[in-house]
Image (cartoon, rainbow, N blue to C red):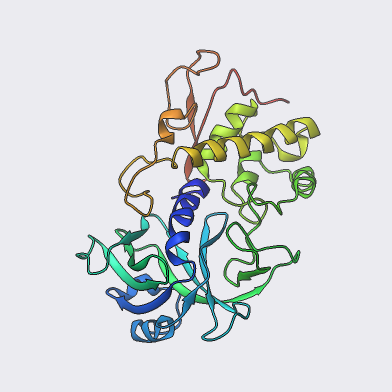
Amino acid sequence: MPELPEVEVVRAGLNPAVAGATVVAVTVMDERALTRYAGTGAEFEVALTGRRLRGAARRGKFLWIPLGPDAGDGAATEALVAHLGMSGQLLLRPPGADPERHERVRLDLAHPDHGEVAIVFADQRTFGSLTLDPLVPTADAAPAGLGTLEPAVPSQVAHIARDPLDPAFADRAFRAALSRKGSAIKRVLLDQTTISGVGNIYADEALWRSRIHPETPARTLPTRSARRLLAEVRGVLEQALAEGGTSFDAQYVNVNGQAGYFARSLNAYGRTGEPCPRCGRPIVRVSFMNRSSHYCPHCQKLRG
């Protein structure tokens, strides 16, 4: 599953192409890509054609493009929301380019500065989707996420917490939430209603950097440890973002189809049996929430 850095790489790549562009044509090749849309493929094509795009925005792993009104510069009331799922890709292609493998939907755009371009939504496993969703006010009246100044978020994303790279993320509120939770700290990091954008890979890496055992009850973390953990979460996300995200196969790519290389920088995740870069003892892998946790038992001791 793509995590925050992978989605942010896509958002940043899309933004120059979509901000100010107009949708001149929409082609739905596979309606399985519209599972969250209430209408048909033909209705989706009609509803989106002619709309002006306001740029690409993101909260956690959720990506959307606010849609401007047909005339004037009023606030956007609706957005095109992209759920990448397990293998969804948003690719920029020249107009008239041959169909991509696993292409599901294509948007042909006209940009006043950059000319014509196509956005291709490709998805091998068909767990991702596109939909149109109304925008609702943010609970804190702050901009909804990275890439937008409007305090309006798609209704399907409204329950998702802000991510730690969001300027409006509240550190103190996050630490207070930890103090109320008796569940394992890794489980809390994966809870998108508490903090968004942190998936399995980056949770393991941040916990390793913080020397915290993944099963540590969240409420037992001292304030100093909670502060350090949040700093390390930000650090690992920012490093992964700088390196284009983590790619173990051809699924997680930017808008030009290029893979990230943060996998080379991993200290714990996926390194079962290899020496810990800090102490030299073997990294272990244990089952966790139908996934796996990777950590160093020597560096990340579970305190009683």
Tell how many labels: 0
Q: Residue furthest left?
A: 98
Residue 24: where, in percent of width, then height?
36, 79
The residue depicted at 49 percent of the width and 26 percent of the height is 267
Q: Residue furthest front?
A: 113
Using the image, determine if residue 47 lies above or below residue 113.
Answer: below
Q: Quadrant of residue 140?
A: bottom right
Residue 35: where, in percent of width, then height?
41, 73
The residue depicted at 39 percent of the width and 74 percent of the height is 34
Using the image, determine if residue 19 lies above or below residue 236.
Answer: below
146 on left or right of 254: right
Q: Quadrant of residue 157?
A: bottom right
Query: In the picture, which quadrant includes the C terminus?
Result: top right
Q: Nearer the viewer, residue 10 or 191?
A: 10
Q: Nearer the viewer, residue 92 or 181?
A: 92
93 on left or right of 154: left
Residue 20: where, in percent of width, then height?
48, 71
The residue depicted at 47 percent of the width and 43 percent of the height is 291
Q: Nearer the viewer, residue 82 or 223?
A: 82
Residue 288 visible in the snapshot: no
116 on left or right of 230: left
Residue 277: where, in percent of width, then height?
50, 18
Residue 162 visible in the snapshot: yes
